[in-house]
Amino acid sequence: MTRRAVPVIGLAAVATAAAAAAAALAATRSADRRPVSGRVDRTLRVWRLSARNSARFAVSKVRGLGSPDERRAQLDNEFVIRTAEDVARELGQMKGVLMKAGQMISFIFESLPEEAQAALATLQADGEPMSPTLAAEVVEQDLGGPPEQVFLDWTDRPVASASIGQVHRAVTHDGREVAVKVQYPGVHEAIEHDLDAAEVMYGVFSSMMLKGLDAKGLVDELRLRMREELDYRLEAENVLTFAEVFANHPWVRIPTLVPSCSTDRILTTEWIDGLTFDEFMRQASSDTKQRAGEVLWRFAQHSINRHGIFNGDPHPGNYKFHHDGSVSFLDFGLVKRWQPGEWESLRPTLDAVVIDRDPVLVVEAMEESGFLRLGHGLDPEVIFEYVSSPYRPYLVDEFRFTREWMVETLARVLDVKGPHAKVIEVLNLPPSFVILDRVVWGVSAILGKLEIEGPFRAMLLEYVADGPPATDIGAAEAAWLKAGASS
C-alpha cells in the first residue's frame, strides 16, 4: 500500500487552548446544478419581486414614507449600532484578535472552568450587528450603488453577524437568492493594528505556555491566517477552489460564488437553505447524524490528504445540514495551504503515531521534525501515551466519539501538573502544525456531540494508505473519485 502522511496528533491544544483562554480571561457552499424547474422558479421570483418593489415605490410616493433611508434609520434605532468608530474601538486593544483566537479554540469550551467558559462565550457569540446604513454604505462604495440598485431585493436586517462581518440575504437581478457577507468598516485596520503589535502576542504566549514552545513561530502562523481572513477576495478564491475539488460530490455541497458582487470587503454566494447545527441535533435521526458526521470527517480528510488545502475552522456555525445527511460548507476564510516542505516535515511523526503505533519511531520522528528537543531523556512509552491519547479513534478497530471522551481527553492533554508534566514541558509546536491540529480537535468535538461511531482506523487508511472503502459513504466517495478520473 502507498503510505501518505497521517494528519493526526494532539499537541497544539496545549499551546493555543491554554494561551488564548488565559488571554481571554485576562482581557475580559459547487456549480449550479439546479433543474430547469429551478430556473423557472427564479424567473417567477424576479417577476414577483419587481412587482412588489414597484408597488412599494408607488405607496411610498403617496405616503412619503418607506424609503430605504427611512427604513434603515428605523432599524438603526432597533440595533445596538456599530459605527465605524465603534468598530475600531470595540476591536482595539487586541480584542479583535482575541475574538478570533477564542473561536479557533472553541473545541475546548466544555472542558474549561465556568469562569473561562463565560469569558470565551463572549468571544464566540455572534457580534452585535452594525447599523443597516453602514452596511449599505459598504455595498455602495464597493459595488457602485445602494443595495436596492445592486440587488433586486435586499434585507437590511442581517441573518448572522460575527467578529469581522455580517451576512445579509438578497436576490440578484437574475433571480438568484444569495448570501452577502459585508465586512465591518474599520475592522481591517483595527485588526491589522493588533496583528502588527506582535510583541504583545509573543508576550502572552511566552508567559502562559510551554517552556519549549517557539512562541514567535506560533504567533506568526496565527497572524498570517487571521490576515487572510480579512481578505474576502482570497476567500472567494477559496470558494472556487473547494467548489472545484468537491464538484458533484455525493454528500458535500459548496455554495456557488457570485464574482460580480464580490470585492475585498464583500463576498456573495448562493443562498443555502438547511438546518443549523442545533436544529439538526434536535430534528435528525441517529442514522442521519451518523451520515452527516462522517461527511464532515471525510471533508477534512479528502482536503488534507488529497489536495493539501483545507478549511481550518471546523465550527458548527459554518455548516448547513440537510435531511439526507449531506452537508453544505459555508465559510472559507480560514484556509491552510501546505507550503513546500511543510507536509514533508510533519509526515514521519504523524505516520509513526497512527500507522506504526511505535513509541520509539514516534520519538525519533518528533525529534527530527522539531516537536521534541534532543537530549530530553524521556521514556518513549510515556511520550507515546501522551501524544497518542487524543487519537484513540485511529488506534482501534471501532470507536464511538462522545462528549465525555472529548472532555476527559482534553483534560489529560491540558493537565500541566499531571503525570505527563515532563512531556508537556519539553514539547514544541512546529508553526506549520497549528491549523492542522485545530482541525483535528474541532472535528473531534463536533463528532463527540453527534456521537458518531464507526471503523475510523480503516476509514483513515482509505486516505493515507489507499485502503479499501470501510463504509457505504466511503464507497460512494470512491465511486465519485473514479468517475472524476475517467471523465
Image (spheres, rainbow, N blue to C red):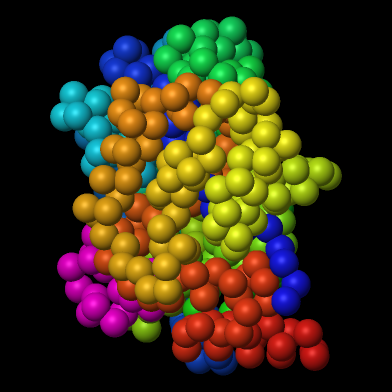
Q: Nearer the viewer, residue 428 or 288?
A: 428
Position of the N terminus by quadrant? bottom right
Which residue occupies 30% across, 50% down? 406
Q: Nearer the viewer, residue 172 or 310?
A: 310
Q: Position of residue 54 (x, y in %)?
A: 42, 63
Q: Is residue 310 visible?
A: no
Side (left or right) of 263 relative to 439? right
- Give above or below for 60 relative to 280: above
Q: How many marks?
A: 0
Which residue occupies 75% across, 72% down? 2
- Give above or below for 40 relative to 413: below
Please name the predominant secondary structure of the magenta segment in the image.
helix
Query: Looking at the image, which residue sits at the far right?
Result: 340
Q: Nearer the viewer, residue 441 or 229?
A: 441
Q: Nearer the viewer, residue 81 or 444?
A: 444
Q: Is residue 89 magenta?
A: no
Side (left or right) of 423 relative to 364? left
- Give above or below for 243 relative to 469: above
Q: Quadrant of residue 443?
A: bottom left
Q: Is residue 288 magenta?
A: yes
Q: Position of residue 219 (x, y in %)?
A: 59, 23
Position of the C terminus by quadrant? bottom right
Q: Is residue 346 visible?
A: yes
Q: Position of residue 378 (x, y in %)?
A: 52, 30
Q: What's the magenta region? A: 278-293
Q: Position of residue 121 (x, y in %)?
A: 26, 33
Which residue occupies 64% across, 23% down? 375
Which residue occupies 46% across, 63% down? 395
